[in-house]
Image: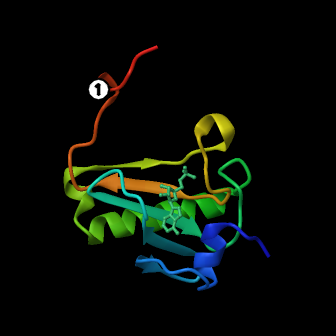
């Protein structure tokens, strides 16, 4: 049994606002949104990141993301999916999750700092 915040949400020990749920995946609102729409797609099975996940799991999560994007009007105007991996990737929660960002025009590379 893992102790990360998403396992606790999945077990019902912490509250969340659910957008979607089935037996394998939940999609919840991010508690600290950085865009008008900021959701997290999370597998119920504990996996650290995409490096540990199998193709079946990744494929299933992406099917769910496509479904919620279509059903909630995100697909028409576009949206962004990101996943952070490890220290350099800035992964805070050690349980695989995909950020779903949209609902407005998101900043592009040209609007960010250059190296
Ligand atoms: P990451 O940096 O990719 O690990 O992102 C973790 C995300 O989880 C952040 O965007 C947080 O705002 C979000 N988060 C942390 N705790 C909760 C929570 N209890 N409910 C919803 N989102 C959360």
Lateral position of residue 3 relative to residue 60, left or right: right
Residue 10 horizontal/vertical position (percent): 60, 79
The residue sitting at the right extreme is: 1
Lateral position of residue 16 relative to residue 23, left or right: left
Please report the residue visible at 63 percent of the width from the left and 74 percent of the height from the top: 44
Image height of 111 relative to 41, above or below: above
Look at the image and tell me in which quarter the N terminus lies. bottom right
Would you name the residue on which mark 1 appears?
A: 111
Residue 6 horizontal/vertical position (percent): 60, 69
Image height of 103 relative to 113, above or below: below
Please report the residue visible at 46 percent of the width from the left and 71 percent of the height from the top: 27
Instruction: Give the number of marks.
Output: 1
Residue 56 horizontal/vertical position (percent): 64, 62
Residue 24 seen in the current view = no
Please report the residue visible at 35 percent of the width from the left and 53 percent of the height from the top: 101
Residue 23 or 36: which is nearer the viewer?
A: 36
Display colour scheme: rainbow
Helix or strand or loop: what does disc 1 sit on? helix
The residue sitting at the top extreme is: 115
Image height of 110 relative to 23, above or below: above
Residue 22 or 108: which is nearer the viewer?
A: 108
Lateral position of residue 1 relative to residue 98, left or right: right
Residue 57 seen in the current view = yes
Residue 111 or 50: which is nearer the viewer?
A: 111
For the residue carrying disc 1, how many other residues have a C-alpha within 10 Å: few (<14), some (14-19), or many (20+)? few
Please report the residue visible at 51 percent of the width from the left and 74 percent of the height from the top: 26
**Disc 1 residue lies near ligand 1 with CB under 8 A:** no
Residue 100 or 33: which is nearer the viewer?
A: 33
Task: Quadrant for residue 11, please give it.
Answer: bottom right
Residue 111 horizontal/vertical position (percent): 29, 26
């Amino acid at each position: 049994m893992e102790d990360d915040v998403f396992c606790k949400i999945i077990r019902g020990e912490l509250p969340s606002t659910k957008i979607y749920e089935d037996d394998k995946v939940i999609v919840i609102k991010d508690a600290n949104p950085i865009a008008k729409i900021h959701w997290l797609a999370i597998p119920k099975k504990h996996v650290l990141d995409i490096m540990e996940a199998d193709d079946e799991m990744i494929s299933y999560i992406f099917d769910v993301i496509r479904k919620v994007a279509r059903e909630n009007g995100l697909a028409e105007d576009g949206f962004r999916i990101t996943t952070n991996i490890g220290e350099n990737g800035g992964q805070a929660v050690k349980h695989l999750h995909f950020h779903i960002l949209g609902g407005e025009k998101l900043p592009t590379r040209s609007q960010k700092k250059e190296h």
